Image (cartoon, rainbow, N blue to C red):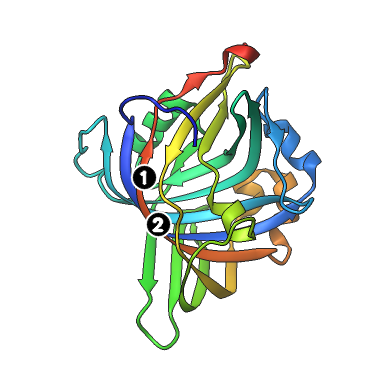
Amino acid sequence: MGTKSAKPFLTARWQHLLMINYVVGRDLLLPYLPRGLELDDYQGQHLVSLVAFNFLQTRIKGWAIPFHFNFEEINLRFYVRRRTEDGWRRGVVFVKEIVPRAAIAWVAKKFYNENYQAYPTQHRIDLQSKNPQVTYEWFFQKQWNRLQVSPVGELKILKENSLEAFITEHYWGYSAQKNGTTVEYAVEHPPWQYWEVTEPLVKISAAALYGKDWEAPLSTQPHSALLALGSEVKVFGGKVLKSFV
């Protein structure tokens, strides 16, 4: 996973990660690609993911912030890689991230220049009934936007080179800065177990949230979906890539 700082900037538990994936053209992603990176692909296809999850037990530099300990996050991300002397670093770039509180968004913007927005959020996790469902919602433009899946069967272990491994095992985050540089930060967690899912439901205002170019790609049938159990996570401080200053 690469060399990391001695101490993480943020620790948390990411739990019940709903991931709905779409195939998109590379031309849609290139304007968002930070300098020094390449688009990553799975079997020749470029994927983006709508990801929603519970961000729990959050601490920044070891400190718990009152009223910002547990919350939902919903993001739209795509997959990238960077060649280093030690091999490829595979990571993600976020198009937009949604959280329920403005202070959370402010911290992410200040330290990572991530495109965070604050809207009311809620979730429902039902894994015990005969018809289990996992739902995440956020209130935007006077209506609730929704992502929902129905998990089936038992938890599964990731298989090497599988689609599920590609989606979940990117351990670096990248963001483009206003001055044109690229910041890289490491994310550490064990491989996640996951459930297969059926009936992925996406009810979102795609054009208003992400831009008109995203409306058609996110209105198609999803390529795939899964629900990851999650784990404890460490997010390390960002560093400017000197080679691309």
Please give the name of the residue rendered at 61% of the width and 55% of the height, measured from the top-left corner: 205
Q: List x then y, in percent, for residue 151.
A: 49, 75
Quarter of the view holding residue 220: bottom right
Quarter of the view holding residue 86: top right
Q: Callout 1, which amino acid?
A: Val
Viewer-side residue, 122 vs 111: 111
Q: Which mark is residue 233?
A: 1
Q: Which quarter of the image is occupied by the C terminus? A: top right
Left or right placement of residue 195 versus residue 199 in this view: left
**Residue 195 sits above or below residue 243 on the image:** below
Q: List x then y, in percent, for residue 56.
A: 30, 51
Viewer-side residue, 25 vs 13: 13
Viewer-side residue, 49 vs 243: 243
Q: Which mark is residue 97?
A: none
**Residue 136 sits above or below residue 87 on the image:** below
Please give the name of the residue rendered at 55% of the width and 41% of the height, measured from the top-left corner: 96
Dot 2 and dot 1 residues touching (CB under 8 Å): yes
Q: List x then y, in percent, for residue 165.
A: 57, 55
Whether residue 6 appears in this view of the structure is yes
Left or right placement of residue 182 versus residue 220 in this view: left
Q: Tell me how far mark 2 sits from mark 1, CA to CA.
A: 9 Å
Q: Callout 2, which amino acid?
A: Gly
Viewer-side residue, 205 vs 128: 128
Q: Which residue is label 2 attached to?
A: 230
Please give the name of the residue rendered at 22% of the width and 37% of the height, measured from the top-left corner: 65
Please give the name of the residue rendered at 33% of the width and 35% of the height, measured from the top-left corner: 10
Neighbor class of circle 1 (other Cα within 10 Å; few <14, some 14-19, many 20+) is many
